[in-house]
Image (tube, grey):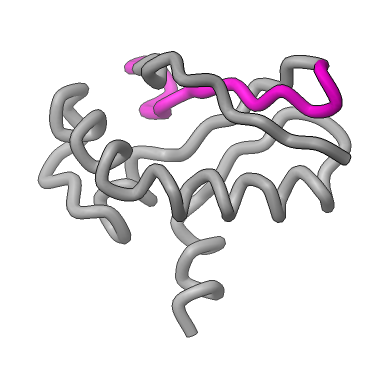
Amino acid sequence: MHIRYRNDPPRFDGTNLLMRFVADVDGVPLDCAITAEALEDHFGADSALEESLRRAFARGETRIHAACTEAIGQAHGAVVLHSGYFRAEDD
């Protein structure tokens, strides 16, 4: 399986408090996201406001993409990374 992350900036989803991004999996786009809570807990966002979440996503982008790659291998569809996933990873 070949996974590539687009260079597009993540999209803020204020209704669901997510930062959304796209992974191309074997050339097929897959919607992915990380919760505001995960960005606050693990990547230094100081609020759920869009700009704070964008800065946190940029700081943690490599780690977020690595976690997403692992989750894609276990999921059969869209991926949403929650704070609990990173807590388990931090242990």
Q: Quadrant of residue 85?
A: bottom right
- Left/right of residue 51 with respect to residue 42 in the rendered view: left
What percent of the width, then of the height, locates residue 89? 53, 73
Q: Position of residue 67 (x, y in %)?
A: 58, 54
Residue 80 drawn at (x, y percent):
60, 38
Q: Quadrant of the N terminus?
A: top right
- For the question of whether residue 48 can be seen, the reply is yes
51 vs 12, left or right, is: left
Closest to the observer, 83 or 7: 7
- The image shows residue 17, relative to residue 41, as above or below, that is above
Q: Position of residue 11 (x, y in %)?
A: 40, 15
Q: Is residue 13 visible?
A: no
Given residues 26 and 89, the one toward you in this image is 26
Numbered disc total: 0
- Toward the bottom, the furthest residue is 91
Give the residues drawn in magenta, as a range: 13-27
Give the residue displayed 15% in from the left and 33% down from the top.
52
Q: Residue at the location (81% across, 30% down)?
A: 77
Side of 1 relative to 8 (left or right): right
